[in-house]
Amino acid sequence: MRKFLVKTILIVLFAITPLVIADYVSSKNYRNRDHYPFTTMTDIVEGRLNSDLWILGSSRALVQYNPRILDSMLNISSYNLGMNAQFIVPEILCYRIACEYNKKPKYILLDLMWRSLTMETAPVSRYFYMPYIFNYKVRRNICNNNIFSFEYLNVPYYRFHTEKHEENNYMSCLTYKGFQARDIPWSSIDLDGLDTIHYHREPRAIELLDSFLFDCRKNHISVIIIHSPFQRYGFEKIHNHNEMLDFYKGIADRHNIPFLDYSNDPISFDTLNFYNSMHLNAHGADLFSAKLAHDLDSLGLIPSKQ
Amino acid sequence: MIFNSFEFLLFLPIIFAIYWLFRKKIKLQNAFVVIASYFFYGWWDWRFLILIAFTSACSFASGLLIEKVRNCNSLDEHKQNSCAKTITAANIIINLLILGIFKYYNFFIESFLSLFPSLNADKLLISIILPVGISFYTFQALSYSIDVFRRKIEPTHDIIAFFAYVSFFPQLVAGPIERATNLLPQFCKKRNFEYSLAVDGCRQMLWGFFKKMVVADNCAIFVNTVWNDIPAYNGSTLFMAAIAFTFQIYGDFSGYSDIAIGCAKLFGIRLRRNFNVPYFSRDIAEFWRRWHISLTTWFRDYLYIPMGGSRVSKAKIIRNTFVIFLVSGLWHGANWTFIVWGAYHAILFLPLILLGKNRKNTNLVAEERLFPNLKEIGQMLLTFLLVVIGWIIFRAESIDQAEKYIEAIFTQGLFSIPLVPFCTLYIGIVIIVEWLQRKNEHGLEFKLHINPWLRYPIYYIVIMMCIFCSPTHNEPFIYFQF
C-alpha cells in the first residue's frame, strides 16, 4: 500500500508540474496582451488607474464613454471600467478589486440599463480575471462569487483550458484607458430580431446597488447614475421603460445623487450614432462624451476647474 | 457526480483511504461502501436514493422469502417451487413496473395518443425525472433474485453486503451489470490490498479517461455540429460523422466501463469485462459477444435461454431473436429509434443463427499474428459498416431523421471530399492501441516487468493528453440517459 501511495503521489506531482508551469507562462502572456480586457485588468492590478473619475457599467459603458474627451473637457483623469456583457454583480466586483490596488476615485459615473439590476453573471466575466486568479487581493474578492468554481480557482492551468473559446471574441479589441471605440456602421439586424423586452429587477441586485452607493458615500466618492443614449426604436422595445427610468430616479433620490437620462436626447434618435440598437459607435460615443462632459460641468457635478 | 469531474477526483482518494482503514472489519467496510455509494448516487438527486433502496430491499427480501419457502417442511417440493416462483415473479414485476413507469410511461402514452390524434388526453402524461442508472441497478438486483430461484447462489442474510452489491458506486450508474454470483461473494469475504491489482486499476482508469475525454468528447463536437445541420454537409462528411459517432459511443461507454472496472480494482473488487474490442468483429454475432457484454449476457441468460434459446424450432428461434433485440433496443430508451435499431440488428443476426454460423468466430481475430489477412480485413470492414448504419438509427432523434440522414449520405455527394475532423487523429490512436492490446483487458495493460522507462512516459503522455486534448466542456456520458 505504501509503495502504491508513494508512486501515485509522485505521478500526480509529475502531472501537476507542467500545469503549474503552463499556468505561470499563460498568466504572464495574458497580462502582457495589448487588448481588452487584459489591458484594463492589468492597469487595475498594477495600480495604474491614477484616475479621479471611474466609469462603471456594462458594454454600453465600455464603448460609449470616451476618457480622452472627458479628460480634456473636465480637466480630470478618467478611466473606463465598463465590462462587456456584465451587469451589476461583476461591475461592483470590478470596482472593489480596483479599489484594492488603486487610490479611490473622487467620482464614479455608473451607467445603468434595462438589465443592470439582475443577478446574472455571464461566464465571460471569468475570462477577465483569468491571469490574476492567484493574486491575493483579486482572489479574496472573487472567491465568494459562484461563477468561479473550485477547479477554476485552484487547479493550475484549468481556467486557460476552459476559456480558450473566448479568445477570438477579444483579440482585436484595442482600448484607450479602458474605452473601446467601435467604428462600425449601423445595422438593424439585432433590432429586427429583438422581441419586446420586459425590464425587471431583482431584490438582491437592488440591495447590492444600495450597498455599493452607501460604500461610495462613506469613501467620499460622488456617484452619478446615467442612462446613456439608447437607439430610440430599440428603446421603444423595452415596453416598461418608463418604469425603469422612474426606478433609477427613485434610487438616485434616495441616495441624494444625480441621475442623468439621455434616452430622449437627440443623439438617441439618429441611427448614424449607433452600430446597433444598444451601443453608440465611435462617432456617437465622442458626441455623447462631449455632451456628458458639458452637462457634468454645467450642472456643477464635476466642475472642470478642479 | 460524474467520473471526469473534480468532485470525483476529490471523492475517490478520500473513499479509498477510509475504505482501506476498515480492511480488518468486513461489515464496517461494506457499510462504508454503501454510505459512499449512496453519497455518490445522491449527488445527482437525493430522491433517487429512495428508489435504489426500495429495489435493493425488494430483491433482498425476495431472496430470504425464497429460502424460507424452501425450508418450509409443511410444503411439498412442488408447492415450494411454485411459491418460490411466485415470489421471484412478484419481485420482477415490482421492479420492472418501477422501471417501466419511470422510463416508459410517457413514451407509451405518447405513442398511443399518436395513433388516436383526436383523443385529447395530454393529462395522462406526467412529469417524471428518469433516475440515473435505474436500468442498470434494476437488472443487477433482478439477477440476484432469479439466481437465488435457480439455486445458482445461496440467498444472503447480510443486508449490508447486498446493498453494497446493488449500489457499488463505480458500476452503479452505467454498468457493467454485475451478477450476484460474481460480485456478491466478493463483498462477503475479506479483501486485501493487492498492489498489482490497484496499479492495473489505475492504468485501466487512465485508459478509460482517455477514451472518454479525448476520443469521445472530441468526436462529440464534430458529430453534434453535423447532426445539427444535416443539409449543410456533403454525403462523405455525413459518413465521417457517422463513423465519428461510432467511436464517440464506444469511447464514451467503454471508457466509462474501464473507469468503473479500474476503480473497483482499487477497492480489491473484480468486475466483469464489458467490452472486448467489438469493432474488430468479423460478423454481427461476434460483435454482440464483444459489445456491452454484461447486458447481452443478461438477456441471454434471463430471457433468451428461458424462452428456449436456439434449441427450439426455427420459427421460435426467429421469435426469440427478435424479442431479445427489440427488448435490448427498448432497454436503451423510450424512443422508436432504439426499437428500430434493435430490429435492425435482429435482421442482421438472424441469418447467422438460422444457418448455425453465429459461433463461427469465437477466437480473437489474427490471434497469433500482428496483422489480419485480407479476408479478415474485409469481414471486419463489412461488420463495421453495418454497425455504423445501426448507430445512425441509434443517434437520430426520430426514425424520420435517421432516414433523412442515411438518404443524405447517398444523395449529397458520397464521393466528394469530406471534412476531416481533428478527432480522426484520436480515433486512429485508439484503433492502433486497441489492436495491439486486443489480447489484454484494456489498452494500458502492461506486464509489470516491462521497462519502467517505457511505461511511465506512456502513462505521462496519456495523462497530458487527457488534460490538454480534451474539449473545454464535459460532454455527459451517453449511457447515463439509459
Image (tube, rainbow, N blue to C red):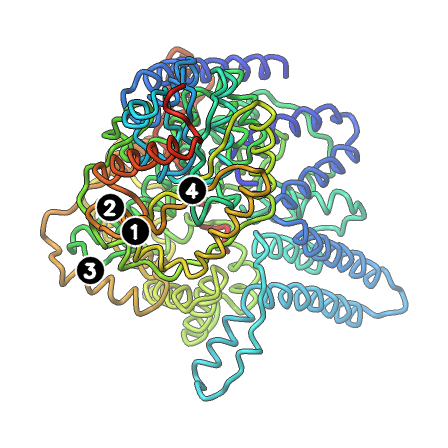
The quadrant holding residue A256 is: top right
Q: Does label 1 or label 4 sit earlier along the sequence?
A: 1
Asked where in the image residue B128 lies, by quadrant, the reply is bottom right
Q: Which residue is mark 4?
A: A260
Disc number lying in front (3 or 1): 1
Count of marks, rendered view: 4
Marks 2 and 1, how far apart in space?
7 Å
- A135 up-or-down from A279: above or below: above
- Disc assigned to residue A231: 1
Q: Are marks 2 and 1 on the same chain?
A: yes
Q: Position of residue B345 (x, y in %)?
A: 36, 62
Label 2 SS: strand
Closer-to-camera residue (B1/B187)? B1
Chain of residue at mark 3: B
Question: Which mark sits nearer the N-terminus, 4 or 2?
Answer: 4
Return the mark for residue A274. Answer: 2
Quadrant in which the N terminus of chain B appears: top right
Identify whether B105 is placed above or below A45.
below
| Kind of element beneath mark 3 | helix
Res. B356 in view:
no
Estimate the spatial distance between the alpha carbons at disc 1 and disc 4, rounded to whole Å: 16 Å
Q: Dot 3 corresponds to which residue?
A: B231
Tell me the amino acid under the disc marked 3.
Answer: Pro
* Residue type indicated by callout 1: Gln
Choose the circle earlier in sequence order: 2 or 1.
1
The reply to whether dot 2 and dot 1 touch (C-beta < 8 Å) is yes
Q: Amino acid at mark 2?
A: Phe
Nearer-the-camera pick, B182 or B97: B97
Q: 10 Å neighbourhood of mark 4: few (<14), some, or many (≥20)?
A: some
Q: For numbered disc 4, what is the local secondary structure?
A: strand
Q: CA distance from mark 3 to mark 4?
A: 51 Å
